[in-house]
Image: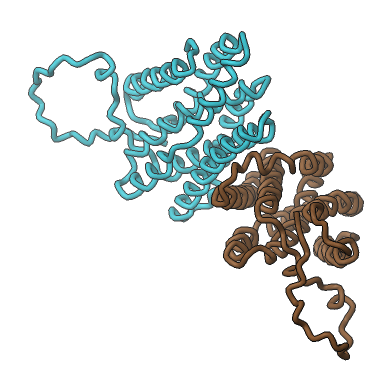
Chain colours: A cyan, B brown
Amino acid sequence: MVSWINRRAARPEAPRQRPRVAPTELTRVDFTELVPEPVPFLGQAAYIQLVFFEGLALAVQTAPTLRAKEGLSAAAGVALRKHHALIAELRLQGVEPVDVMAPFAPATVRLESASRGGDWEELLLAIHVTSGMLDGYFSRLSNGLHADLARRVRAILDEAGSAAVLERELSLAIAEQPGLADRLALWGRSLVGDTLLIARSALRASDARGLEERVEPIFTELIADHTRRMDALGLTA
Amino acid sequence: MVSWINRRAARPEAPRQRPRVAPTELTRVDFTELVPEPVPFLGQAAYIQLVFFEGLALAVQTAPTLRAKEGLSAAAGVALRKHHALIAELRLQGVEPVDVMAPFAPATVRLESASRGGDWEELLLAIHVTSGMLDGYFSRLSNGLHADLARRVRAILDEAGSAAVLERELSLAIAEQPGLADRLALWGRSLVGDTLLIARSALRASDARGLEERVEPIFTELIADHTRRMDALGLTA
């Protein structure tokens, strides 16, 4: 589904001295070298937003307060808007969105089941962890699409979504319930593997050589983002 | 919450011969004579849209096909948009939406529980019946608000929502599953009472004399609409 194209083939071949940079910068990956196929890219991204919507809608239905319902329903609306905007892009590509999304259902449904926690707080953290990792990932991956489409898709995916309300509700719950922080820390850790599998599947169809090694730093970065997100809640990642 | 004001007080008092009209026209009620209080009206209407959204979101989550998910998720988006647009109107009135909606929670949640059927088809019919009756009711009731607000609220409530997709999915299911029509006919009938209670509660706070008798034709009309809706599915109302 994603192919590597060295867009810098014209780069001079003579080895150059490069300045030493901080380790985090060393691992930063140039996503524009990843060129996803537009149709499956849009299909997978659209399906994932549908799953975020379903998770947020479940969080609305089971919210303990009307205040929480309000914040979460707004976030559910954003995920749904992203989903439908990506569906509209698929139609522009002349394909039937349902057919394009179908192959992504099994893996995504697996992530969805794995992230349905025992209670409302675990559900919230699951959405926070998975959408936090995957929204950023797909947005950056979209840079490899052709310029017009890339701009539109980035505009769709970069709309601020559920992060603020999830962080607010989770922080309140953690402050009120002793022991919740420890349980959520474990729960958050258990979600990372499945989320990375989804991210990896977006690259699966590529037959480019050396993909594995080049992809590794992307996942390092996703995990670093995840750690920052957990830190913001006072949770050990 | 709603008061009756006779806006036609200047009407000539001499009895006139009126032409005979068909019975259905005789029972048609002039909703502009019902003047709801804007704040509780908006609060109840907003809460009801949130409940429709939750029902449609549950229908998305439990849909047997991706095609059904697509149609229902669009309908869920419309209900959510109506909810948030009504919330925005409440903020324009200078009140906190959560506080205004809270008193309507118990009755609405009761309707919600009563309308969670045993399976997906019963859920779909419940949303179809309740939103069919209440959307039209609140839209017509909004005519009694002051002109600017009435126009905006009508624009919000009259957006085509879930009716088309619910009718399509239900018709498909009824055609495929022998015996489903009989079960759904019974189920649809059982929902009317609870829905009328919600409609009646929108008029509850009125202290106008003779309300009961004047309200009766409204409910007759709501039930006639309901019968047409069931007929369209080939179901006995």
Which residue is at 75% across, 50% downward? Answer: B127
Q: Tell me, yes or no, if residue A121 can be seen here.
A: yes
Q: Tell me, yes or no, if residue B77 can be seen here.
A: no
Quadrant, the N terminus of chain A: top left
Q: Is residue B25 left or right of residue A140?
A: right
Residue in the foreground of this view, choosing between A223 and B225? B225
User: Residue A126 in the image: x percent, y percent?
Assistant: 56, 24
Residue in the foreground of this view, choosing between B13 and B237? B13
User: Residue A9 in the image: x percent, y percent?
Assistant: 17, 34
Q: Report which quarter residue B12 is drawn in.
A: bottom right
Which residue is at 76% across, 48% downward? Answer: B124
Q: Is residue A103 left or right of residue A24?
A: right
Disc tally is 0
Q: Is residue B33 above or below residue A173?
A: below
Q: Report which quarter residue B218 is drawn in.
A: bottom right
Which residue is at 79% across, 47% downward? Answer: B121
User: Residue B8 in the image: x percent, y percent?
Assistant: 75, 77
Q: Is residue B225 left or right of residue A86?
A: right
Q: Report which quarter residue A208 is drawn in.
A: top left
Residue in the foreground of this view, choosing between A35 and A26? A26
User: Residue B37 in the image: x percent, y percent?
Assistant: 69, 56
